[in-house]
Amino acid sequence: MGLDIRWPIGIIFTIYGAVLLGYGAVADAAIFQEKSLGVNIDVWWGLAMLVFGLFMGALAFRASRRSES
Amino acid sequence: MHPHTVDYAIIAIYFVFVLGIGFALRGRMKTSEDFFLSGRSIPGWITGLAFMSANLGALEVMGHCANAAKYGMYVNHFYWLAAMPAMCFVGVFMMPFYYGSKVRSVPEFLRKRYDEKTRTLNALCFAFMALLVSGVDLYAMAILFQRLLNWPFWASVVASAVVVAIYIYLGGLTSSIYNEVLQFFLIVFGFLPLAILGLKAVGGFAGLKASLPNPGYAHTWANIWHAADNPMGVNWVATIFGLGFVLSFGYWCTDFLVVQRGLAAKDMASAQRTPLIAAVPKMFFPLMVILPGLVAIAYSPVRNLLWDPAKSAYNYNQALPTMLGSLYPSGLLGLGLTALMASFMSGMAGNVTAFNTVWTFDIYQTHINPGKEDHHYLAMGRVATIFAVVVGIGTAFIVLYFNNLMDYLQLLFAFFNAPLFGTFLLGMFWKRTSAHSGFWGLLCGILAAAAHYTLYHFHYIHYPSDMAANFYQAIWAFAVCFSVTVVVTFFTEPRKEEELVGLVYSLTPKPKTSHLPWYERPSVWAIGILALCAVLNIIFW
């Protein structure tokens, strides 16, 4: 059996979401003033990716449970 | 553009992750068939995305961004006039044919429908085109390196080539289909913020319209009637026939890299739905690729960086990297760079491998040195890979002469895909088409493209833009291929009908969809997609 594609998608976006969220939370606010027009895009986009990653992971988990039973 | 530790960490995470998947799956799944066999539980929308991820590389993102910066919203036609109807056509008419006839590749179809020489001609063209396209990926990666590390262009190209060679050597392709689906999501997450931030930078859509260099940049259809009115310099005949018919149908119907994803579906109905599902997100891609290009040319801090004083012209290819550098803070910048690099690398690796396969099996083994041991051909394959990477370095310098790499890519399509589409169309829908006619039609079509390009290049014929020349070149190549094939057919023997079962549409059994509920019927999907697409065309008229 191969690997359900939703696992790698879920894992990498969970990691990336967490990294961006964490970095955005501690980063100097000046970089967001200088670049992204004052929006802390790292925190918001990190959050979006984290939610997406966890959702994909959950789908993969549900599918793997179902195929076992 | 000044990446920090966090950006490099994000890039590193990706490569460790991808090589890890490749390693874990080594020897277990190599083809798209394996991929789909693993996932009978995988819903149709993921197979649809896999279908599209073969088409959406970073070249598309960077190329159409450059294209939009150069020609404005007219570029929407590449999506709403070209891709949408072609994808619906593939889903409704071509998929049943491909699926039912068990045709699995372009050379296979050409050999069975026409003859060996038609296949060889196509193989030669394909190998040549793969080398030229791999240069585009290398070029794109090099200008990214150039931006990041401030190296000269030639050093960046060589460095990129070395990185790609290592990637291929480490088996970066063993898990290629996983990579492509992953990359699809990376590209979406990596570039969607660019559209959002870009729109904010210019003060919304109204602000964007007001700051575009030319009011014609803000319209898709309004200036199509006369070539002089729109920035691309093409009229409605060239746009609708050249782009909307020849180039787009040629690409979507004959590009088997894309079609094979659909063929691996579990049944006919899901095979047909695959391109139709893919068409839905594809319809909204202009938001992600064309909008940032428009912002790049409207927003003065970015536009000023695109100006190349040495050539006193804009370097549109830099539109996307410059937008990233100007609007992305550290963190997000790493994500954007990862999406670009991952995609260029696998794009280049894919082209090199395609070249290697066609050269070794369709040309070398068939014509030059048949009947050797397997390891002889494996060794030949390795030599071909190195050869392709080295030639790729050379072709990267050709791209340097084009300020918009989409001009270059469409030129290649107009050379090879446009005539091939004529050969396919006749072979598939007209059973009288004779075995010899395919070769002569294809050859004359390519020569017509070459003649047209020569005349344009040396200024014997004039067009307002390179893209306009590409559209007309595609029309000529297709028309010549089509007419020569028809004429030669009447002077040569037809083939027996029983040999053509499964190769010609009218002689191939077609599936019934009447047992499906209406919302699962491909034709209903296609009508819905075209209707939605029409609405988008009207909104952005």
Image (spheres, coloured by chain):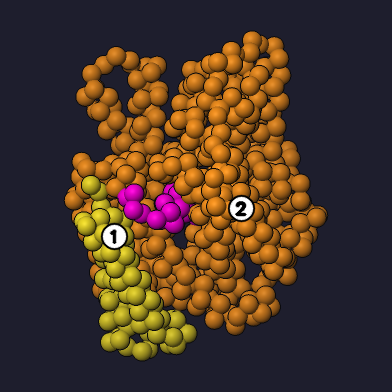
Front one among B177 and B162? B177
- Please state if B197 lies on the left or on the right of A16 as rendered: right
At label 2, the amino acid type is Val
Q: Mark 2 Cα within 10 Å, few/some/many (few <14, many 20+)?
A: few
Image quarter in which the C terminus of chain B is found: bottom right
Residue at x-position 55% and y-position 15%: B498
| Residue B248 to residue B447: above or below | below
Q: Which chain does tag 2 point to?
A: B
Spot the residue most to the right.
B226
Q: Which mark is residue B524?
A: 2
B117 is higher (above) or lower (below) than B135: above
Residue A63, label in figure: 1
Q: Quick check: is B40 in the magenta stretch?
A: yes
- Specify the segment rendered in magenta: B39-60
- Residue at 32% over, 83% down: A24
Q: Which colour represents chain B?
A: orange
Q: Nearer the viewer, residue B393 or B111?
A: B111
Chain A on-screen colour: yellow
- Say whether residue B395 is visible: no
Helix, strand or loop at mark 1: helix
In the displayed structure image, the side of residue B265 where residue B434 appears, left or right = right
Q: Given the image, on which type of amino acid does mark 1 rest?
A: Ala
Q: Position of residue B494 (x, y in %)?
A: 63, 13
Q: What kind of element bears circle 2?
A: helix
- The N terminus of chain B: image quadrant: bottom left
Residue B540 appears at what percent x and percent y? 69, 67
Q: Chain of mark 1?
A: A
Q: Is residue B109 left or right of residue B339?
A: right
Q: Is residue B108 magenta?
A: no
Instruction: State which quadrant residue B488 falls in.
Output: top right
Specify the quadrant of the image occupied by residue A8: bottom left
